[in-house]
Image (spheres, grey):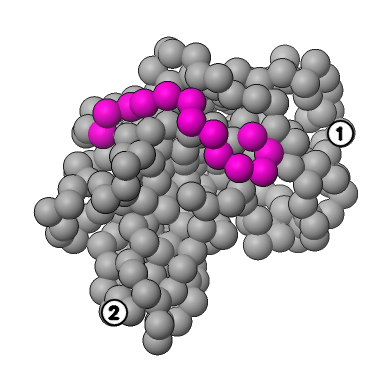
Amino acid sequence: MTSRRQFLTVLGGGVAAAAGLGAGRHWDLSGFTTVVGDGVYAATGQDPVTDADIALENYGTYSRLRANVLNRGVMAHGISYASRSGSRMMRVTHRAGFSFRLPYLPSQAGGDLNAQTVEGGLFVWDGGLDHGTAFQWVLNPWVDTFGQVMAWTGDSWTPAGYLRPDTAWHTVNFTVDPVRLRVRLAVDGHRLPAPYSRTPKTGWGSVVTARLQAEAISLWPGENATWAPQHEVDLRDWTWRRT
C-alpha cells in the first residue's frame, strides 16, 4: 500500500479553490486541481511519473480521473482536489463526499485497463499537522486484499471493511471536526471504523487549508515493465459543507 500524500508541496506554494465551492451539489469536478501524488513507481529504464501520465476529464454530469494514460511501465497516481484556506477551517466541522464508479472491472485476465486503488479523503492542514480521514479501495486483482476498504490512521492504512469490486456507483461521505477531534467515514451509508488522523508534513507552509480529494493509482507494473494498463475512475455529485 502507498503512504499518505505528499502533494509535491503544492499546498506550500499556493492553494486553489474549486469554482463555485459551497453547500450545494456539483455534478463534475470542474475547477478541481489535479496533481501527481506520491504513490508512484517507474520500472527499470522508465522516466519518472509526471503530469503527462495523469488526467482529469470533465463531462458535465461526471468526471473521469485517469492514471498512466500513456500506458508506460509505471505506477501513476493522480489526485484531484478542491481546497479552501483560512484560520476558520480549523474551527468548523466539514462534511463532504462524492460518488465514484469503475467504468470496467479489474481482472487477472489483463487488458488495457486495470487498477491498484481508488482513494479519497477530507483533510485540514493546520500548518504542522494534516487532520482528517481517508479511504482506500484495494483493486489490484492479484492481491489477497482485493476489494478491501482501508482507513487512514495518520501513518498507515488499516482494514475497515469490504466493497465487492463492480461497475456500480458508490458513495463516500466524510466528516472532519477539528475542534472535537472527531471524524466519520461512510461508504454507501455504512459507517467504517476510522480514527481521527493527524499526519505531520514538511514543506507545506503555514497557511491553514482544508481540502476534499479523490485519487486513482494505476497497477504496479513490475520491475522491468515497458507497458502497463491505465486506471480510470468516474466521479460525480460532490458536496462540501462547513458549519
The answer to whether residue 83 shows anywhere in this view is no
According to the picture, the residue beneath numbered tag 2 turns out to be: 226
Residue sitting at x 12%, y 54%: 109
Give the residue type that dot 1 points to: Ser
Residue sitting at x 63%, y 56%: 7
Q: Quadrant of residue 198?
A: top right
Give the residue type that dot 2 points to: Thr
Q: Residues within 10 Å of mark 1 (few under 14, many from 20)?
A: few
Please state the horizontal and vertical placement of residue 9, each as a whole percent of the image. Answer: 71, 60
Please state the horizontal and vertical placement of residue 42, each as a whole percent of the image. Answer: 44, 74
Residue sitting at x 45%, y 82%: 47
Please state the horizontal and vertical placement of residue 81, each as a whole percent of the image. Answer: 56, 44
Please state the horizontal and vertical placement of residue 74, each as a whole percent of the image. Answer: 38, 70
Q: Secondary structure at mark 1?
A: helix
According to the picture, the residue beneath numbered tag 1 turns out to be: 87
Residue lying at the far front in this picture: please name it.
Answer: 144
Residue sitting at x 46%, y 68%: 41
